[in-house]
Amino acid sequence: MGSTLRIMSLRQLAVNGVHMGAVIYGKPQHPPLVLLHGFTGSALSWSPLFAPLSSYNVKLIALDMLGHGQSDTPSDPARYAMEHCQEDILEALRQLDVQPETAILLGYSMGGRIALYSAFSGFFRALILESASPGLADSEARLQRRTSDEALAKRIEREGIPAFVDYWEKQPLFKSQQRLPEEERDAIHQQRMDNQATGLANSLRGVGTGSQPVLHAHLGELDLPALLLTGELDGKFCAIAQQMQQNLPRASWHIIPGAGHAIHLEQPERFVAQVGNFCTQVLS
């Protein structure tokens, strides 16, 4: 098969003592767009967007965060912490022959929080954040969130994945996804069901919003092109993005009509256009 063909390959990489799942799609010679999924997602969550995104002359590298997809599910919650996420991502990309300052990093929700932290490594050329945050600035709010995340982690371990997924899909944050076609909702549901209780519980403990490093005071140091995307129905994250835009030196912010938290699922064509045009501008 020639190098001009867009082909998908699934890999499992040995990084820093764990295995990390990766999906690669696109022409090998194109610059990379690295994709980080949200909580309960996986690298393959992005698969409906692979073909349209790759038409913007980028090669897609979607990674499974620890506890998700084809990645390992360590028993120690500390192994899931943000600094380890960054180390794993950078090592995985080195193994895939990605050179510094060539890749654009895109993260959604949990993946967006990981992407923002990882962008401070200096490895990436640009950053795209979908429905993401720099953490909780208030110490009391962080404590409350860690407490609620620990309670949810114990619930996952106690009741199992089916009961948790049923609970999770009823969260107000995902209400707008009920408008998706039944076939799409079923596919998302099945992908969530493929997770393991240990992986999701420890992901909450290790890299939950209450546990992540607080980055508000450091945003002014992140001198690289950044695109912030939020859905118009997701008021909480629109407010967060507005604040981040004011502090990031080179950020633009776009609100996507008709979308809630998961823009790439609810308005995929608009999402692809925003991401693709940004990549074109950065790489030109």
Image (cartoon, grey):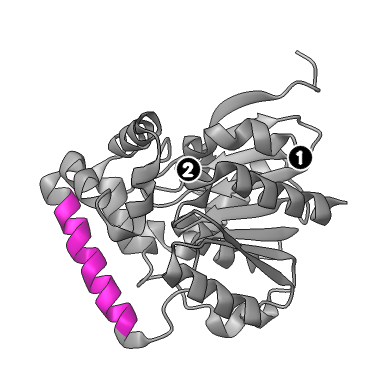
Q: If you read the primary sequence from the N terminus, does the residue marked by circle 2 or circle 1 appear first? A: 1
Look at the image and give the residue range highlighted in magenta. 141-156
Q: Mark 2 falls on what kind of element?
A: loop
Query: Which amino acid, by three-letter code, is at mark 2?
Result: Asp
> Residue at image x 37%, y 31%?
187
What is the quadrant of residue 76 in the picture?
Answer: bottom left
Query: Residue 142 vs residue 256: left or right?
Result: left
Query: Residue 2 vs residue 9: left or right?
Result: right
Q: Residue 5: x percent and y percent?
A: 75, 20
Q: Residue 229: x percent and y percent?
A: 58, 61
**Front-most of residues 157 and 97:** 157
Query: Which amino acid, by three-letter code, is at mark 1?
Result: Tyr
Query: Residue 149 vs residue 92: left or right?
Result: left
> Residue at image x 81%, y 56%?
282
Q: Residues within 10 Å of mark 1 (few under 14, many from 20)?
A: some
**Front-most of residues 163 and 155:** 163
Q: Residue furthest toward the left?
A: 158
Disc sitting over residue 254 in the figure: none
Nearer mark to the viewer, of 2 and 1: 1
Disc sitting over residue 64 in the figure: 2
Q: Is residue 153 magenta?
A: yes
Q: Is residue 275 magenta?
A: no
Residue carrying label 1:
56
CA distance for labels 2 and 1: 23 Å
> Residue at image x 75%, y 13%?
1
Question: Is residue 75 in view?
Answer: no
Q: Residue 188: x percent and y percent?
A: 37, 37
Image position of 198 with respect to 84: above or below? above
What is the quadrant of residue 59 in the picture?
Answer: top right
Image position of 203 with respect to 30: above or below? below
> Residue at image x 74%, y 68%?
224
